[in-house]
Image (cartoon, coloured by chain):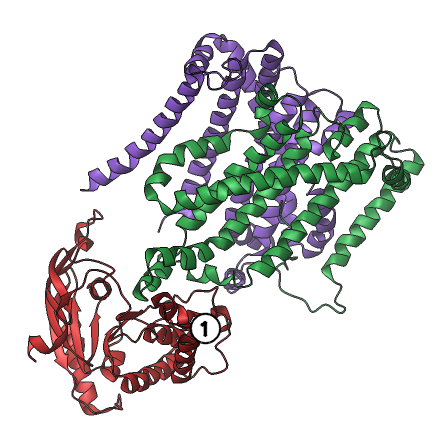
Chain colours: A green, B red, C purple
Amino acid sequence: MRSSEGIPGGAARPTRRARRRIPDWLYGLGTVAALLALWEFASVQGWLGTHQLPPPSKLAGTFQQLLERGFPRGLTADVHIWATLWRIIRGYALATTLALPLGILIGASPLLDRATAPVITFARSVATISLLPLAVAWFGVGEETRIFLITYACFWIILTSVVDAVKGVPAVYIRAAETLGASRRQIFFQVMLPASLPRIFAGMRVALGVAFLVIVAVEMIGTVTGLGALIMEARTFYRSDIAVVGMIFIAIIGFAIAKVLDIAERLLLPWASSLDEVQR
Amino acid sequence: MKTVDAKIIVDRVTKQFDAGDPERDLALKDVSLAIADRQFVSIVGRSGCGKTTLLNMIAGLLHPSQGEIRVNGVPVTAPGPERGMVFQQSALFPWMTAIDNIEFGPKNQGVDKVTRRQQAQDLIELVRLRGFEHKYPRELSGGMQQRVAIARALANDPDILLMDEPFGALDELTRSEMQQELLRIWQARQKTVVFVTHSISEALFLSDRVIVLSPHPGRLRADIAVPLPRPRKRTDPAFMALYEEIHSAIF
Amino acid sequence: MNAQRWQHGLWVSWLGVIVVLIVWQAVNSFEIVNPRIFPGPVSVLETALTRFPLETLLGHISASLMRVAAGFALGAGLGITLGILAGWYRIFGKMLWGPIEILRPIPPLAWIPIALIWFGLGESSKIFIIFLGAFFPIITNTYKGMATIDPMLIRAAQTMGVRGLKMLAQIAIPAALPDIAIGIRVGWSLSFGSLVAAEILAAQEGLGYMIMYARELGEINVIVYGIILIGVLNLATDFLIYEFLFKRRLRWHFGQR
């Protein structure tokens, strides 16, 4: 799950001078607005069953209901959102604390890297959701199961990113540091780690996206709080409007998370793009 | 020149790699040379002649398969700040500003903050980058980056400066500007310089001596003295004669 | 000397695997964890070989693979087509970008309730989820591929008289292929993941179902077996994509120097 890329221009077509510069995002917004209007219209005309796809007008009401009364009764939107976020935070934090040091260790040691490579490759290919029945057998249907699954999914992604990042530090930086008289330890902390940061960060973004993906699935079993649970409950009660609003919430949260990471990256790693130029 | 005076002695060095490619594996065969203190020596030759390999061995980044390299009479076993190195891709640490890059060596040698900041500032002045010391590498042009790289290598006050085609990635105008800058810095700081380049013209412009290596395997082909006074003009007949001599040694 | 280095590399990897297996078996044999919920590799292997007649197993596997293939094909077909059009016709691209950006952050599985309402409990709803898994990464990467074509290539072709659809087919699309391939790889892995989840949540056949059913029967060995099988399939299919798509057909981009 990545944040929105800048709108690419068709470099392929010869550019024609636009008479008025319409900002790109306006196109997107306009299309969405047009689709919403069409949707509403189709619903009013009876072409779309209000159960199949409730119109935006109805959804607005549902939105409000969810914020005030909640669904099921008493569980308002913020409760669900927080439940989901809190699970992600815990699983993600656990995965990071485990994967970062381990990844650095493995990345810095060719022996460890070769020894662990097949195991890591396999463990990473295991579909996290397929672990659900096993996790339930181990931890029951409580929070631990959900946290475990998030942690599992994120752990392998972060681990491989960190290993690749450390391995991928351009050799010339190490050589330069050596000729400047830095010790092994100094090189490790002052050169290898900073040089790996951009790639590590990229991996952590991917991991967060995956965490989000997994949590929604995982919440569909064994709990009533959380965005995944919300839409599952909605289905049980044939409230398709709540299911759709739930999905909208999910979209918003997902989008927000990606944006936050963008900003964090720009703040923490302002120098990042230059790393690519040295990669040869 | 008596070998006992020599700053750098390359003593019958052979370098064998084993990447499975017999043509390229024997990088250097039985190369010997002596470089005096404060001499500016260039090494030229075609691709594959081993000039970068030789430089890396003097730096201590690689070890000879046979033979030995001695600096100040002591065999070279590892890289160190007394043999500063400048790379073609500048290799400036992108997460540090220019001045932080320059301070990197002294900082790790334990020099205190005030002293090293002052020294770094002096070097910034020397390479004529005042005002740019707090910029990140990506904010600097290629020529500026190489100036910082030179300053960074000089920060440890090495006796020897090893330069691996440092101006190879620059455009011709910047390149010729940098050549003059390098001469100025060298004359100000009096270091022994070993300079690897593809450009015969550059080698002649800068050095006291030009060493020619021939490839497959790398061997010493010629050792040509350049007694011309500096600054040199490329149109000078003596210059052009030496150019021809080196050119025919290579090809 | 060369052979020695090769061996040094490979046997270390095998050693790693063997160590893991030994530790795994030890945890089980010494009952560090309750063996009823933590079977050892030996018993899982035994189950693997004896529990299911080959045809049942193949039945599950093919059911799963067919679903993914169908969903993926739809996702890739639509994703690549729309991605190319969006990248080539700028206006269309900018218009499409809005709805895509809004729908993209929604995980495929979040669509399950709606999918069930729209398509019922049959195959279509699962294929729809899988389709979603493939569609978004593929269209995003295709679009990116089309948009980041080196303008120099276009200009070079123009000077040779190439125009219009010929430009699109002979220059633009090949230039975008590496990114499209990346999209395919990501899309496949996402599809696969969605498949398993979809089967676990609502299916009568297939590998996910096999695991869920085993859970109901309390057959922990089968669960572990199923998990490993899915992992192996995932790895195998990804390997195939990588080998044939990236290393062979697209060797001109991804190949070793």
Q: Nearer the viewer, residue A275 or B19?
A: A275
Q: Residue at x 51, y 14 (%)?
A: C221
Q: Nearer the viewer, residue A194 or A42?
A: A194
x, y percent for residue C140: 62, 46
Report helix, strand or loop for mark 1: helix
Q: Is residue B146 left or right of residue A15?
A: left
Dot 1 corresponds to which residue?
A: B98
Circle 1 residues within 10 Å: few <14, some 14–19, many ≥20 = many
Q: Is residue B219 left or right of residue A76?
A: left
In this orientation, does residue C138 appear? no
In this orientation, does residue B65 appear? yes
Determine the image quadrant of residue C104.
top right
Q: Quadrant of the N terminus of chain B?
A: bottom left
Q: Residue at x 20, y 72 (%)?
A: B43
x, y percent for residue B84: 29, 71
Q: Residue furthest left?
A: B2
Q: Residue at x 48, y 16 (%)?
A: C39
Q: Is residue A140 left or right of residue B222?
A: right
Classify C234 as above or below C56.
Answer: below
Q: Amino acid at mark 1?
A: Ala
x, y percent for residue A171: 35, 57
Q: Chain of mark 1?
A: B
